Amino acid sequence: MQILTRFTDFINTLFPSKLGFQNIFEHYFFEQKYYLHTSASLENFAKLLNTNADKLNHISNKYNSSSFEELIQQSRYEHLMKEFQNPFNASLPIESVIILSGFDNNESFVNYAKEIQQNNLKSINL
């Protein structure tokens, strides 16, 4: 396994592919909706992509203008808002839709929504 890791590092040194890694990041995170997993975290995603957490955070900050953890929350929130508009979900309890959107529970969603509201108020007052 160590030989494979060294060979991969050697190839990556010769042919850096930042754009390729960004595409992989976007594929798993956005297209495969990694953020919907309740266990979604920087560390778990780094293991999934066989890279380190600093590299993922750098890509998230560079291409999405937020930390990886914030990107998870933003993506969950956007997904949740879309699900509320879906007529198929009209008969589901709100908490079910919240949990299916990756939040641990209703309280974690409410806390994030309050955080968004506070940040919006701060930006208005500046």
Image (tube, rainbow, N blue to C red):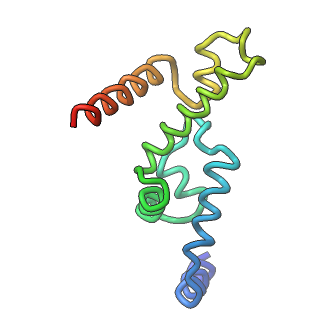
Residue 110 quadrant: top left
Compare residues 53 and 33 and report the one nearer the observer: 33
Most extreme residue toward the left is 126
Most extreme residue toward the bottom is 14
- When the figure is inspected, residue 71 is found, relative to residue 13, above or below; the finding is above
Quadrant containing the C terminus is top left
Residue 118 quadrant: top left
Q: Report the residue at 60% width, 27% height from top.
A: 80
Compare residues 85 and 79 and report the one nearer the observer: 85
Residue 17 quadrant: bottom right
Q: Report the residue at 51% width, 20% height from top.
A: 105
How many marks can you see?
0
- When the figure is inspected, residue 37 is found, relative to residue 1, above or below; the finding is above
Q: Report the residue at 52% width, 65% height from top.
A: 51
Whether residue 8 sits left or right of residue 90 in the image: it is left
Q: Report the residue at 28% width, 32% height from top.
A: 124
- When the figure is inspected, residue 2 is found, relative to residue 64, above or below; the finding is below
Q: Could you say where residue 24 lies in the image, as x and y percent from the top left?
A: 64, 63
Most extreme residue toward the right is 88
- When the figure is inspected, residue 96 is found, relative to residue 121, above or below; the finding is above
Quadrant containing the N terminus is bottom right
Whether residue 92 sits left or right of residue 64 in the image: it is right
Q: Could you say where residue 2 lies in the image, as x and y percent from the top left?
A: 57, 78
Q: Could you say where residue 34 lies in the image, as x and y percent from the top left?
A: 62, 45
Q: Could you say where residue 42 lies in the image, as x and y percent from the top left?
A: 47, 50
Whether residue 126 sits left or right of residue 93 in the image: it is left
Compare residues 94 and 40 and report the one nearer the observer: 94
